[in-house]
Amino acid sequence: MYTQSLSLDQEKQLAVATAEEQAKEAAFEARIEAGDYIEPKDWMPAHYRKTLVRQISQHAHSEIVGMLPEGNWISRAPTLKRKAILLAKVQDEGGHGLYLYAAAETLGTSRDQMLEALHSGKAKYSSIFNYPTLTWADVGVIGWLVDGAAIMNQVPLCRCSYGPYARAMIRVCREESFHQRQGYESLLVMMDKGTEAQKAMVQDAVDRWWWPSIMMFGPPDDASPNSAQSLRWGIKRFTNDELRQKFVDATVDQAKVLGVTLPDPDMKWNEARGHHDFGAIDWDEFWRVVGGDGACNRERLATRVKAWDEGEWVREAALAHAKKNEQQKEAA
Ligand code: BYC
């Protein structure tokens, strides 16, 4: 009665379509294998597109939410020089968000859709931005550790197989490296020339930001559902744990030069591994923060939603202006 059978013609068409899909997929895999960049108009598997939209849009959200913890200190920076540096840095982060939204849009998802996902809590952004910035030293430590971790994670993304993302990352990484250095330099000044209270403030900020910074790299490899496929497609070039280890190894000596202690009694050089061993990460805390229950999740999201709502008249005015220009051009 409910026959599902296809006519011979339909079966043939289906077989041809499947064979075509398979050929496209094989050609795509061969290009990935050869290290080619995939460009917006090229054929790509639906899952590759979806993975990129997920990662790039979440990266973009992280940049614009990442403006908030430091933005909190612009009006309280201790000198004109520090204020100018911080303003430039926070502005750069807004710019990074824009390059990244533009890169994600080339995959066919609109900026409005991406922002709706952020505002409704469906899309993630980096866990690190849900911690509060309690003192001026936090601004320096964010530059040193958070931007340092970001660079470690993002330099390999300059070789991501998707062209628009890879190209956006080149500029982002150049700017991130200035961000890292300004943070480290401001901490060096506090540790070299500061009072005992200022030095203690730096150590306290390191104590609070260290563990969240190494959580930024994401869950351990055996609990990272997306890594294997993203590595095969050349979206990611290293695993979460590999990048975390590189970051720990690079940071230990920087902490020594600075004269601060990393708050991990289990941290020690392991000659056999050629790496530093480090203590257990509190993954319950990580998932709690990712799940929306960190110290500042609600505040961060509410700030973004308010900015979006209050910016409505600006978006309307910009669209009306563009329309008027278009009409004037047509009339001329
Ligand atoms: N926070 O399978 P996994 C910056 C999620 S911006 C929240 O390993 P994947 C900066 C992950 O999304 C920093 N969520 O995922 C800005 C996934 O959930 P969904 C942002 C996290 O994608 C301003 C689930 O956990 N950087 O540095 O293979 C000022 C399982 O994870 C986090 C980027 O976005 C986290 N930390 O690897 C200063 C870089 N970690 O999506 C600094 C680009 C994981 O399946 N992104 N999750 O629901 C990446 O490199 C990768 O997406 C990640 C995660 C390494 C972050």
Image (tube, helix red, strand yellow):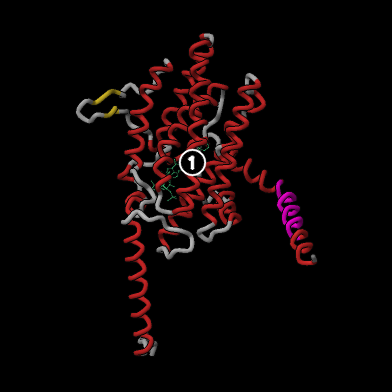
Q: Residue at x 37, y 42 (%)?
A: 219
Q: Position of residue 86 (x, y in %)?
A: 60, 29
Q: Decide: is 40 above or below 140.
A: below
**Residue at position x 64%, y 19% from top?**
79
Report how many numbered discs are placed on residues in the image.
1
Q: Which residues are magenta?
A: 311-323
Name which residue lies at 55% across and 42% down: 96
Figure quadrant of residue 93: top right
Helix, strand or loop for disc 1: loop
Secondary structure that dominates the magenta span = helix
Residue 225 can be seen, yes or no: no
Say which of 260 and 180 sits in front.
Answer: 180
Asked if the magenta segment contains residue 292, the reply would be no
Going by the numbered disc 1, the residue's amino acid type is: Ser
Viewed as shown, does residue 198 lie left or right of 286? Answer: right
Asked if residue 288 is positioned above or below residue 52 in the image, the reply reads above
Residue beneath disc 1: 126
Residue 199 image position (x, y, % from top left): 50, 13
**Which quarter of the frame holds ligand 1?**
top left
Q: Residues within 10 Å of mark 1 (few under 14, many from 20)?
A: many
| 210 or 120: nearer the viewer | 210
Instruction: Provide residue 123's location: percent of width, then percent of height.
Output: 51, 50
Q: From this view, report whether residue 212 is shown above or below residue 256.
A: below
Quick check: is 314 in the magenta stretch? Answer: yes
Respond yes or no on whether mark 1 lies under 8 Å from ligand 1.
Answer: yes
| Quarter occupied by the C terminus | bottom right
Query: Closer to the camera, 84 or 2?
Result: 84
